[in-house]
Image: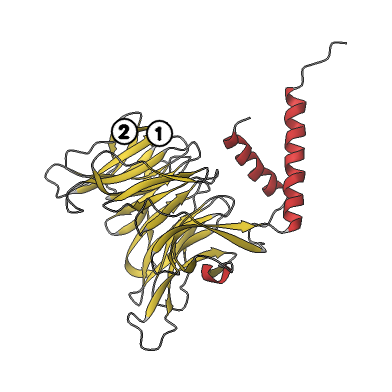
Amino acid sequence: MSTRLLARLTLACLLLLGFNFGARASYSILDLGTLGGQFSEARAINNLGQVVGAAATSQALLPFLYSAGQMISIAPPGTAYGTATSINDVGQVTIHASPIGGPAIPGRGYLFSQGQLTDIGTLGGSYSSAISINRHGVVVGDSFLPGDMIRRGISFSGGTLTDLAPFVVASDINASGQIVGGTGGKAALYSGGSILDLGTLGGAVSFAIAINDAGQVVGRAQTGTGQTHAFLYSGGSMTDLGTLGGSFSHAWDINAVGQVVGSAAKPSLVPGAMPPEVSHAFLYENGTMIDLNTLLPPGSSFRSLDIAFGINDFGAIAGSGTRLDGSVGAFVLTPVPEPQTHAMLLAGLGILCAALRSRNRPAVAL
């Protein structure tokens, strides 16, 4: 049985056993390090615990893959600025990379699969970006048209690049092929052959960032007071997720059980500080926004967790934070199950393995 199948079936067992993914006793944290420089950030984590993002060397910012305890560069040749933006459960990674010369030079989108890099191309312009990938290997992102004046959402599958007009940016795609992003300044969802405007939180603009396999969407939207808040779109309505007491919040990802992660403003504890607010990573579950800094275990190398970019279906969270020495680093915050959770997991795996042995046992001739 494959590791990927085992992960999915374990998750199914936990759901069937009524496991509450919000009932966590504590968290452990892992500092992923860098590629030799002073900066890294984790952008996504899959159900096998593999992480992707960007990390600095002494001369460049490169896309990385962290797997089996090791961070490696997966940068296209000549990359000066790049990041790995998503990873699916078979280890396929999307990358955006710019060549040597600086960030002003247009970049390209790439697919990293089985150790090979594929340039996804453009719609005729000089730029493209690969932003997300689903379990079937379909990539979404954006590209310029000829002349580099008009940007369009794109999908890439089987070597073919497709214009997703009227999407300006396609930011995520789920296993059913539902796509989210932005069009005309509004968050949009492509589903069943039609595009749905998801609206706003009372303001003028919004943008959809992620979608899970249940069709729940998260992103950011302007409120009636002009602030930007994280939203959850589910069951045909958009919910304001609020903030941590400050003026803004952004939702970056949502997992299969509806947990949302992102970043939100919190008033600085330093009187007269400029800026007066700081960004803290958050977890939103059961109707409550939780400051991840309240879950930071003692003895950590981080003094603050600033942005949470990704969450897998087991609740492991990837993002970036500020270390005690002031540098910014990639982290993975992993829930440590309570004792009864271990028992439920073992029981679920026992039931699963017994069922598989029974199914695979040869028939006995009578």
Q: Quick one: 19 or 202, which is closer to the camera?
A: 19
Q: Residues under labels 2 and 1: Cα distance?
A: 8 Å
Residue 147 at what x, y percent from top left? Answer: 11, 45
Mark 2 highlights which residue? 118
Decide which of 267, 167 is in the foreground and name it.
267
Give left or right: position of 33 versus 3.
left
Q: Is residue 92 left or right of residue 8?
A: left
Determine contact: label 2, label 1, CB under 8 Å. Answer: yes
Whether residue 228 is visible: yes
Position in image of residue 11 (x %, y %)? 64, 45
Tell me, what colour scheme is on the image? secondary structure
Q: Earlier in the sequence, mark 2 or mark 1?
A: 1
Residue 237 in sight here: no
Question: Which residue, as the protein is rendered here, is positioned at the far bottom?
Answer: 271
Q: Position of residue 251 (x, y in %)?
A: 43, 61
Q: Quadrant of the N terminus?
A: top right
Which residue is label 1 attached to?
Answer: 113
Q: Residue at x 28, y 59 (%)?
A: 185
The residue at the far top in this view is: 366
Check disc 2 and give the amino acid type. Answer: Thr
The crowding category of the residue bearing disc 2, from other C-alpha atoms within 10 Å (few below 14, some 14 to 19, many at least 20), is: some
